[in-house]
Image (spheres, grey):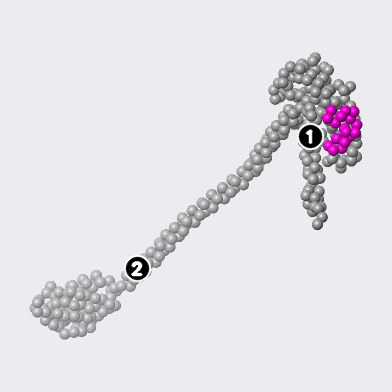
Amino acid sequence: MSDVNQFSLFGLDLSELHKRVRLGVQQLIWGDEAGVKDWLCPKVDYYQLENLQKTAVPEEGEDAHLIEVVLPESQVLAMSMTLPASAEIFLDEAVAAQVQSHSPFSLDETCWGSKVVARVNGSLTVEIVLVSRTTANEALLSATEALGRVVPFGISAKGPSAHIPLLEYRNAAIRERYFNNLRLFGLRTLGGVCGIIFLALIPVIWTTQTAQQHEKLLEETEQRSRGVVRLRSSLVEAQEQFAEAQQFFAAQPDYRPWLHRLASVTADSVYLNRLSLKNATLTVSGLAMNAADYQANLAESGLFSEVNAPAAFTLDNRSGRERFTLTMEIQGGARD
């Protein structure tokens, strides 16, 4: 079984991909082309080492310009090299190899710095500066004594076209303040984006709340309308029942005039204990001293016809009167 590169995936060299991503981030943050560095990086003042004693010490504070001490050109070996743009991911290795092959000092005694100064037609121009470590340390000591107090500074050398900081003597305050500016800019940008998103969401939130309110109002209205519909149905049903009752009672005979008429032909000695009227047939029951005479009076009154006794008269022993039941037809009908 062949060995598999642990930094490969589906034939893709992950280590090279990592270097390319890292290079892209470095170019975005530190590259001159992106413009981020020129915008957010704090301003750096360059002072020649030999003139530092005659220069006013910069003010302290976060807004004070940062300091780079520039070595005399006589103490610096400057050179340049050209590489293909595709080889930029291996720039550190290429510069280290160039330094080892051209440095007049031993490897431990060599300090250097490099900077990409041009990208033209698919190639890179890199400037390199070399100094001895002894020279760099003496410059560090001289600059510290000249400033007279603890002021962040770095040591740079003048290349053919730019100031190049030495790798081991870079001003850490530049990087720190630059990244603080980046973080502040990122937070402000994030806050602005969040603010824009919030402002964009306000109509959506308002529309949603309004829709929910309308939905709730519609639901309440439907509930109230259902109550009104039920009440209306009850009223309609009650009206129908009342109309039916009116029709029922309108179809019933009126007892009052016939009670008066019956009373007018009934003697005081006659007691009626039951009376019913069905259509034009009137039925009365009661007690009379002489039931036959009462039957004759009714027949002779001209108010009734067919006055009959469906059952024989009987004597009520307790009252001494005759118990009777008589049926008769009302002259002219029950509605008269």
At a point 83% along the width and 37% down the height, the residue shown is 92
Name the foreground residue: 80 vs 300: 80
| Res 334 quadrant in image | bottom left
Please tell me the numbered disc located at residue 30: 1
At a point 14% along the width and 75% down the height, the residue shown is 270
- The type of residue carrying mark 1 is Trp
Q: Position of residue 30 (x, y in %)?
A: 79, 34
Name the foreground residue: 235 vs 161: 161
Name the foreground residue: 232 vs 26: 26
Please tell me the numbered disc located at residue 303: none
Disc number lying in front (1 or 2):
1
Question: Is label 2 in a helix, a strand or a loop?
Answer: helix
Magenta segment: 91-109
At a point 35% along the width and 70% down the height, the residue shown is 247
- The type of residue carrying mark 2 is Gln
Is 298 magenta? The answer is: no
Q: Position of residue 198 (x, y in %)?
A: 63, 42
| Res 135 quadrant in image | top right
Please tell me the numbered disc located at residue 246: 2
Viewport quadrant of the N terminus: bottom right
